[in-house]
Structure formats: C-alpha cells, structure tokens
Amino acid sequence: MTRPHPRNSGLRVDLNPAAAVARNARHQGDSVVVRYEGGDLTYAELDDRSARLASVLASGGVGEGDRVAYLGLNSTAFLVTMLAVFRIGAVYVPVNFRLAEPELERVLAKSGARVVVCEEGHRAGVEAVREATELTRFLLIDDDPEIPAGPAEGWEPWSPLIEAAPPSPVLVPKGADDPAILMFTSGTTGTPKGVVLTHGNAWWNSVNVEMRLDTRRGDVTYAAAPLFHIGALNSFVLRTLVRGGTVVVRRAFDPEQCLDDLVTHRVNSMFGVPQMFTALARVPGAFDRDLSELRAVVVAGAPVPPSLVQQYADHGVLLQQAWGLTETAPFATHLPAEHTLDKLGSAGIPMPYTEVRVVDSVTNEPVKPFEPGEVVVRGPNVTAGYWNDPEAIRAAFDDEGWFHSGDIGYLDEDGYLFIVDRLKDMIISGGENVYPAEVERVVSSMPGVVDVAVVGVADEQWGEAVAAVITVTGDTVITLEDIRAYAGDQLARYKLPRRLKLVPAVPRNASGKLDKTVIRRLATEEN
C-alpha cells in the first residue's frame, strides 16, 4: 500500500476565486476581463480595484465569515465587490433587486450583513428597512456612468474610498467547506431561505462544466441574466474569471443588443432562461447573423419548450438544456450537445461528479424508468445547508445525504432525466395527477401562443380544474375550445384546460420562473 508523502499530509488547496484573479493579473494583467458599457476592466485593474475595496471593507471591521450584501443590477461593481469580499474571507450576499420592501427586509435581516454596497436606484429600499437589519455601513456606487448617483445622507460614496485605500495584501485561502456565497431563494411564495454555497460547491460545478461542455481558456462569455442568481453567476461567469477569459456584462437583457454583442464580441458561452432565447429569436434577421462562435449555450431556470430547441437547432445553434437549483450551484444534470435533438425535451444526464435519482416521495425508494417521482441529488456541488435554518436542512436532506429538490421527473431507459413539474404545483383533478409543465409544453407549441402558464383552481365538481393563462401574438384569436382541440391529440382529457385567461404578459419573476401566486389570482378572474 502506497503511503502519502509527508509533505502532502493535510494539504489544503486554495479555491478562492480572488486568488485566481490575482494570478491572472500577474500573468496576463493587460487582458480585458470585463467588457461593460460603463467601462472595461483588465485583469490588473479588476484585481487592483477589488484589493482596494477589500482594504475599505476591512478598515470598517469586516473579517472572515462576515456577510457583505450587494444590491444592484449587473455591473463591474458587482464583480469588484464579490472579489473584495472573497479576498478577506467574508461571505458575499447578492440580493435580488426586484424584492418588495418586506422581502428585502427579511433577506437583509436574516443574512446578518453589516455592510451593503448599493446602487442609487435601490438605496430607498434599503433606507426603508435598515432599522430592522444589522447594517452599520452603507456604501454607494458613484463612479459608474450607467448608474446615476448623487449625495445621500448616511451613505459613503465608494469611489474616493477605493481611490485612497492601499491594495490589501491580504488574500485569505479558502477550502472546499468554507462558505463563499449566501444566496436567498425567491420569496414570492413564502419566507426566503438562505442557501449557503461554499467555495467547494462553486469549484465542483466548474469541474462538472469543464468535463461536459465545450469551453476553453480565453473564452468570451455573455452575462445579461441577473447575476444575483446562481445560474447566471456560476454557470460561466465565475469560472471565466478564474480561467482567464472575458465576460461581457450587460445590466439587463435586451434581445437586439444581445444579438449584436454575440456577433461583435464573438461570444463562446452564454447562460439564459427560455424567455431570453425566445425574444432573441424574434429579432428580425437573428439567424442570418454569424453565431458560429457559440459553442456552449445553456438554457435552464424554467421549462424549455422543445419547439424552441428545435428552432435554434434548425439554424445551427444547439441550446443545451440543464437542470438544477440554487442548492446545486447550479447544475445537477446537463444534456450533451450531441443529444440535443434525439433527446429533445430532456434535462440530460447527471453531471460527472453529481449523483441524481428519482424516488417515490413516500417511500424514498428509486422508481422504475418512466415512472414520475421526486428528483434527489447528492454531490460536492450541493449546498452545505441553509443559513441558520436547521428545520429547513432537516426537511431538505435525508439520512443518506440526498437533497430533495421538490421537482417531479422521470428517467428514461437510458437514464436521461425529464422534468415534469414542481411537487407543490401538481394539480389533482378528479383524483388524477396533472403536472402543469407537461400541459404547458404542449400548449406552448400551438401557433400564436407566446407564453403559457398552467395552474389549478378550485372547482366544485373536480376539486381542482386545470386553468391556462396565456399570452398570444397581437393578431391571434384563441379560444378555450381551440386549445382543448389542439392539445387533445397529445394529452389525456383530464389534463386539458377547463379555463382560459388571456393576458398581455404571463407574470414571471427575475429568474424567468412563473410567478404562480399572481398567476393563480389571474386564473380566477374573468376575461
């Protein structure tokens, strides 16, 4: 038996992304790392700014394990703040900028953050809830031409502080179990939970991506989806910073700008939700442009209509479906590009270093192929738990360490995962289980339908009735009878909608997921 060399005993590998950026600054300091309308940054500039901000934070008492919150849209400031926090061994808390004040209060209070870095457009929300939080220091971004800013009592403009501070020599090594990011799940259906993502979680997701997708050193990635979500942040952006590539950062998604950017910057990788790719495809002449540099395009975050994947494939762009949650940092499964069409609609196979099962939600035993059950995940990319919430941890993890996702899916005979729906969204109509996502996939392929959501509403006869909330193109006329006739060839009669609500836009949250609370209310209203 070979014994480990004594010099390797207890070896702790530093997984801190800030250390990787510092290395890149030494060896390729003049390379542009961020392209942004408010000003590009080289690796040397990004490392210098984050090191100076680290000094600012440390001088205010922020140390290892402390939380620093960020509230704003995508920008270089988001990345500078994140790396500064990582440098001093603190925990980064990117906050959903679309939260209502009660939700914002719960997130900031629960995080225990003492410092917030904020854009002017979101300062009022912080002001309204600050007394209920532990915040003691308020830094205002004042040097980004994309972000209007003015004097604000009680807030410190950050640019003079960064300019005056010396670059911090401190760069705290971080191991796999050390917390890196505290990311709160959407609060639209209840109290948000703080998902603890460790440096190891982020690292192993990157390894999984490297093993499965066609990504390379020096790649250009596109970041227009909100970076406060793990899908946008850790699919490609964080790992691109580590590997020495370039990130094109846009404050928000605009389909025409996105198309221009993909061509101009010769983008290689991109993460987006289905609605982004739907909007992109509608830009006149979209598929006449040169998109040949796109090699790794991941679509996730919401059910993906197979017709959308087919549309892109017909024009030489393979949208690669993936499935995961904040808790899986984010990818648990991925559909390899070569199976885009022969496994159309599948969320793919488990990532190389991630285990995935489908189990009976009562017995917790694996089910047979094609039999729906709850999808459970285990692996080094899975969250360490929920912040100060032992009850939530007990509810999410079983005794064997499997994380219970709350998603319903099935595995086919080849082990490919198909997501059916959320367990909590299942409709029971006349004693039959109806999975809204299955109905949505069928109805979304109907000509004239732009977007669709399916929910259950109270019904005296059936207990719950299937209701469809739909957006159509401007000149389309669709009736309930039309939908039932179209979907009736593909779905059992008990799955067909019994109610229809036409709306200008189907409500979705910042991550592109359907806002079922608002949708259920709409479904009960008369047209």
Image (cartoon, helix red, strand yellow):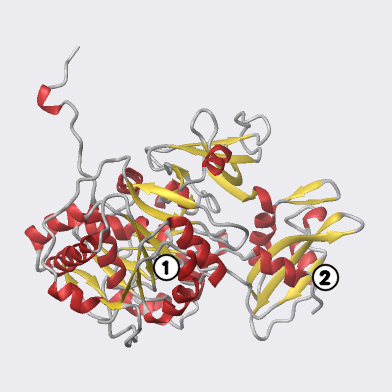
Q: Considering the numbered disc 2 on the image, is that residue within a helix, a strand or a loop?
A: helix
Dividing the image into 4 quarters, which one contains the N terminus? Answer: top left
Total marks in image:
2
Q: Is residue 457 left or right of residue 415?
A: right
- Residue that label 2 marks: 481
Closer to viewer: mark 2 or mark 1? 1
Task: Locate residue 505 relative to residue 524 in the image: left or right.
Answer: left
Most distant residue in the left direction: 27
Which secondary structure lies at badge 1? Answer: loop
Residue at 43% over, 68% down: 315
Q: Which residue is painted at 18% across and 53% down in the image?
A: 20
Q: Quadrant of residue 76?
A: bottom left
Amino acid under label 1?
A: Pro
Residue 344 vs 224, above or below: the answer is above
Q: Is residue 491 visible?
A: yes
Query: Which sits in the foreground, 269 or 54?
Result: 54
* Sooner in the amino-acid sequence: mark 2 or mark 1: 1
Disc 2 crowd rating (10 Å Cα; few below 14, some 14-19, many 20+) is few
Nearest to the observer: residue 207 or residue 127: 127
Q: Which residue is mark 1?
A: 226
Q: Position of residue 213 (x, y in %)?
A: 34, 51
Q: Position of residue 227 (x, y in %)?
A: 38, 65
The x, y position of residue 188, in whole percent, is 60, 63
Badge 1: how crowded within 10 Å, few (<14), some, or many (20+)? many
Amino acid type assigned to the residue bearing label 2 in the image: Glu
